[in-house]
Amino acid sequence: MEQRRHWWNGKWGRLARRDVFLRVDGDRWHVEQRAGGAEGVSQFYEYASAEEAEETVRALLEGTDAWRELSPRPPSAWAPPTAP
């Protein structure tokens, strides 16, 4: 399973922290909504298409929290530039 994106609500602490993950495994897309940090409780959703999974992610990120994307950039985006 490959993690594609990760969002965090910007809050610290077991009671306040929430995370949303978008993952893909073959042709199946997975969304995880986690409350309480690494030891927290998760809800999982599975979809046949990226569009369906992204629709769920958008719904989960609605509200007053200041969501931040923590997804790593692809290696080509952070590699140092090469000299000409």
Image (spheres, grey):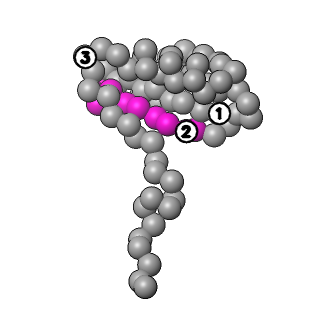
Q: Are marks 1 and 2 in contact (CB under 8 Å)?
A: yes
Q: Are marks 1 and 3 in contact (CB under 8 Å)?
A: no
Q: Name which residue type carries label 2.
A: Arg
Task: Tell me if residue 15 can be seen.
Answer: no
- Which residue ends up furthest to the bottom in the rendered image? 84
Q: Earlier in the sequence, mark 2 or mark 3?
A: 2
- Residue 16 vs residue 47: left or right? left
Q: Which mark is residue 4?
A: 2
- Residue 39 vs residue 18: left or right? right
Q: Which mark is residue 64?
A: 3
61 to 72, vertically: above or below: above
Q: Residue at x 47, y 30 (%)?
A: 38
Q: Earlier in the sequence, mark 1 or mark 3?
A: 1
Q: Are marks 2 and 3 in contact (CB under 8 Å)?
A: no
Q: Which residue in the protein does label 1 denote?
A: 24
Label 2 crowd bin: few (<14), some (14–19), many (20+), radius 10 Å: some
Residue 39: x and y in percent read: 48, 26
Q: Secondary structure at mark 3?
A: loop
Task: Tell me if residue 80 can be seen.
Answer: yes
Span of residues in magenta? 3-15
Label 1 crowd bin: few (<14), some (14–19), many (20+), radius 10 Å: many
> What is the spatial separation of the Cα atoms under label 2 and label 3, in whole angstroms?
24 Å
